[in-house]
């Protein structure tokens, strides 16, 4: 348990602390379902991907999908968690129109993955440790639609039986912002591992947000659980709304009742859905159709050896090998595509300069055009070539900004742009000298001023740059100006 105190919230009776724990449902990236061979692709016609097992036809038997099990192990390892060599599938009994069996196959007392930890970097530079309580495998339910017909409801069982990982955190989060950042980090890890696509708008990842409040140092308060929140921003808004609601309730003389609540993304509010059910309401019992899941350590070792470099390790490498700041390194590793792009730009070049271009001009441009890095009009090879042109003095850093803009518009290579538009830097001293002489001749008053105030030289640099269309090599300009104006240094 974390005893860290987070940012406190002001109430009428003093300061309050928010306590949050997340239960995240992540759809396992797999072509087939957890206990059947039916397909899992998103967007298929209703009921086009339903086997007899998923439809719960009498007498059908579930068969475990080994790949989904390996995905869960992979995820557990990525969460620095203990993998349990024996785990058990249980039936969780409840009625839903889109749950034809009348129970969900899940794991209860013996999940496949035990305790782990996730590190989350906050914008203020703090790194928080979020405990993972467990990860278990379970089936998804189908989907009911109540708004397609005035008097009928429809059921689509495509989702029925798809493998989910439920990842349960400890109540270690202390603000809506931390909860959102944790979810983001979790998604980054799952995407690196290739165990969940993390597409929250397609429902591949959704979070139940548990919120309570307490006076600093007091015992945990009674929590409410907000169901199925489907974006990072909504997690933050829902948690903040719920904390404020509980504080106001308690300070008004009321008492928080443990319950399940719904989040309304249009109003940003939460409202009661049902009072909290207890585990015994579900009458869990081991599914008699399935044997306990048992594997040997060798399987886990083999999977461990095949894991890719994960974001924390990659970040460390960027700091130690490339000399990047922890913040820049964290930004660059936040998704695998960005990291791959960056590494291509940095290869054989100054890694810090490469990082500045990627996190600066490139990110700003992608943001403005609302594009992902894989859609970037500037390829990693072209950005690298632009950096080379600065390094070998073909263009100045200032002209490079203009060339970058043209690269965005035309998708052309920087070398071709510089040649076609005559943007090569002028290092030819006679051309620069001529420009300096013209500026000096036209401004005798400024020449008099600069003798008393050497700082004025900057004004001359600007004028010469303007005269040369920004193409004069700044170092040469400074050097020649100092000589011509008899400046010190
Ligand atoms: P249940 O099995 O009844 O859902 P758990 O103990 O498994 O309860 O907790 C579910 C989630 O609620 C976990 O993510 C946990 O971190 C979180 N949680 C537990 N107690 C609190 C609390 N007092 N305030 C906020 N979150 C909590
Ligand atoms: Mg729970």
Image (cartoon, rainbow, N blue to C red):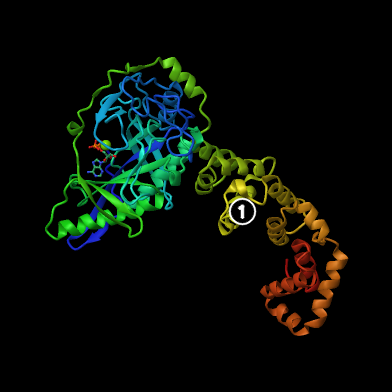
Within the displayed image, which quadrant is ligand 1 positioned in? top left
Task: Estimate the x, y position of residue 276 in percent, counting from the top left.
Answer: 19, 42
Image-quadrant location for residue 293 = top left
* Residue closest to the eye, 336 or 483: 336
Image-quadrant location for residue 74 = top left
* Residue closest to the eye, 235 or 138: 138
* Helix, strand or loop at mark 1: helix
Task: Estimate the x, y position of residue 222 in percent, counting from the top left.
Answer: 18, 46
Task: Estimate the x, y position of residue 432 in percent, counting from the top left.
Answer: 83, 67
Task: Estimate the x, y position of residue 418 in percent, counting from the top left.
Answer: 79, 57
Q: Which residue is mark 1?
A: 362
Q: Is residue 391 above or below residue 85?
A: below
368 horizontally vs 253: left or right: right
Residue name at image x 78 percent, y 83 percent: 444
The N terminus appears in which quarter of the rendering? top left
Residue 116 in view of the camera = yes
Residue placed farthest to the left in the image?
A: 253
Disc 1 residue lies near ligand 1 with CB under 8 A: no
336 horizontally vs 225: left or right: right
* Residue closest to the eye, 11 or 244: 244
Image-quadrant location for residue 184 = top left
Q: Is residue 44 above or below residue 308?
A: below
Residue name at image x 36 percent, y 48 percent: 178
Residue name at image x 24 percent, y 33 percent: 94
Number of numbered discs overlaid on the protein picture: 1
Residue 137 in view of the camera = no
Residue name at image x 35 percent, y 59 percent: 266
Residue placed farthest to the right in the image?
A: 430
Residue placed farthest to the front in the image?
A: 151
203 horizontally vs 349: left or right: left
How many residues crowd mark 1 within 10 Å: few (<14), some (14–19), many (20+)?
many
The C terminus appears in which quarter of the rendering? bottom right
């Amino acid at each position: 348990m974390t005893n860290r105190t987070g940012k406190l919230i002001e109430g009428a009776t003093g300061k309050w602390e928010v306590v949050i724990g997340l239960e995240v449902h992540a759809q396992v990236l797999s072509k087939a379902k957890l206990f059947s061979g039916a397909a899992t692709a998103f967007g298929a016609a209703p009921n086009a991907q339903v086997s007899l097992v998923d439809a719960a036809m009498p007498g059908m038997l579930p068969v475990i999908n080994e790949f989904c099990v390996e995905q869960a192990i992979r995820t557990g390892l990525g969460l620095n968690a203990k993998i349990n060599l024996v785990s058990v599938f249980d039936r969780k009994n409840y009625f839903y129109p889109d749950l034809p069996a009348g129970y969900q196959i899940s794991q209860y007392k013996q999940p496949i993955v035990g305790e782990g930890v996730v590190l989350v970097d906050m914008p203020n530079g703090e790194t928080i440790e979020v405990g993972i309580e467990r990860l278990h495998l379970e089936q998804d339910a189908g989907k009911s639609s109540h708004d397609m017909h005035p008097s009928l409801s429809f059921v689509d069982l495509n989702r029925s039986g798809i493998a989910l990982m439920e990842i349960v955190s400890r109540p270690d989060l202390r603000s809506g912002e931390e909860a959102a950042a944790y979810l983001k980090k979790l998604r980054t890890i799952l995407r690196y591992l290739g165990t969940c696509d993390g597409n929250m708008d397609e429902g591949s990842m959704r979070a139940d947000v548990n919120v309570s409040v307490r006076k600093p140092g007091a015992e945990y308060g009674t929590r409410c659980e907000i169901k199925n929140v489907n974006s990072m921003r909504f997690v933050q808004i829902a948690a903040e709304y719920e904390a404020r609601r509980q504080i106001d309730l308690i300070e008004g003389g009321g008492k928080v009742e443990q319950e399940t609540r719904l989040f309304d993304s249009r109003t940003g509010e939460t409202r009661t859905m049902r009072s909290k059910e207890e585990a015994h309401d579900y009458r869990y019992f081991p599914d008699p159709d399935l044997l306990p899941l048992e594997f040997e350590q060798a399987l886990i070792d083999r999977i461990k050896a095949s894991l890719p470099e994960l974001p924390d390790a990659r970040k460390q490498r960027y700091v130690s090998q490339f000399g990047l700041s922890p913040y820049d390194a964290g930004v660059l590793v936040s998704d695998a595509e960005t990291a791959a792009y960056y590494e291509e730009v940095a290869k054989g070049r100054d890694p810090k300069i490469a990082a500045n271009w990627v996190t600066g001009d490139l990110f700003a441009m992608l943001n403005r055009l609302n594009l992902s890095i894989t859609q970037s009009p500037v390829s990693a090879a072209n950005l690298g070539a632009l950096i080379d042109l600065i390094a070998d003095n073909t263009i100045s850093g200032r002209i490079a900004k203009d060339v970058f803009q043209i690269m965005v518009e035309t998708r052309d290579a920087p070398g071709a742009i510089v040649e076609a538009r005559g943007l090569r830097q002028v290092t030819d001293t006679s051309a620069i000298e001529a420009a300096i002489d013209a500026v000096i001749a036209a401004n005798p008053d400024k020449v008099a001023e600069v003798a008393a105030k050497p700082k004025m030289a900057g004004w001359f640099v600007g004028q010469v740059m303007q005269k040369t269309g920004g193409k004069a090599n700044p170092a040469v300009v400074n050097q020649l100006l100092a000589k011509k104006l008899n400046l010190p240094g």
